[in-house]
Image (cartoon, grey):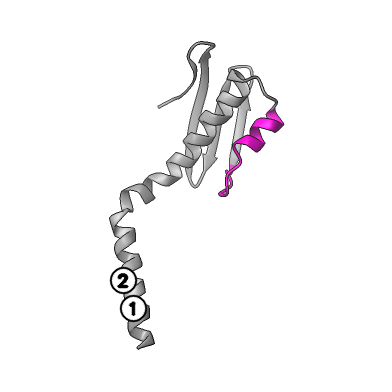
Amino acid sequence: MKRGVATLIVLAVALSVWHERVALFSFPGILSAYSAKEYCSCRYVMGQSDGYCRGYVKQWLPLSSLGDDAAHARVVARGLGQSATAVWVGPRQGCRLLP
């Protein structure tokens, strides 16, 4: 009886993962992109300090690195094997992710 319930639970989880596979495989890129864009906006649009912005973008899943090139207003975030770069475009455009 217990074995059948456990098998049913495992099967339900496997089906759920299969159904959401596209979203699950996209998540690593979303983490780094979100962090780069939000840090860039916090730092260069809102004018906050580095320490404040690092705390602002802190996630449950930590980034492996978050680099801030203040001379070029460019932010690079790396996490879960993915990297994303955001750059400050200007006061009216704010920050954008680079391809």
Is residue 52 covered in magenta?
A: yes
Is residue 29 left or right of 53 when viewed as pictured?
Answer: left
In the picture of the structure, the residue carrying the numbered disc 1 is 7
Q: What residue lies at 37% left-to-right and 79% top-to-bottom? A: 6
Q: In the image, what residue type sits under mark 1?
A: Thr
Q: Are marks 2 and 1 in contact (CB under 8 Å)?
A: yes
Judge by depth and name the residue closer to the eye, 45 or 1.
1
Q: What residue lies at 48% left-to-right and 45% top-to-bottom? A: 81
34 versus 81 height, above or below: above
Q: What residue lies at 34% left-to-right and 59% top-to-bottom? A: 17
x and y, in percent, of residue 92 in the image: 50, 11
x and y, in percent, of residue 69 in the image: 61, 23
92 versus 26 height, above or below: above
SS label for mark 1 = helix
97 versus 18 height, above or below: above
The magenta region covers 50-64
Q: In the image, what residue type sits under mark 2?
A: Leu
In the picture of the structure, the residue carrying the numbered disc 2 is 11
Image quadrant occupied by the N terminus: bottom left
In the picture, residue 58 is in which quadrant?
top right
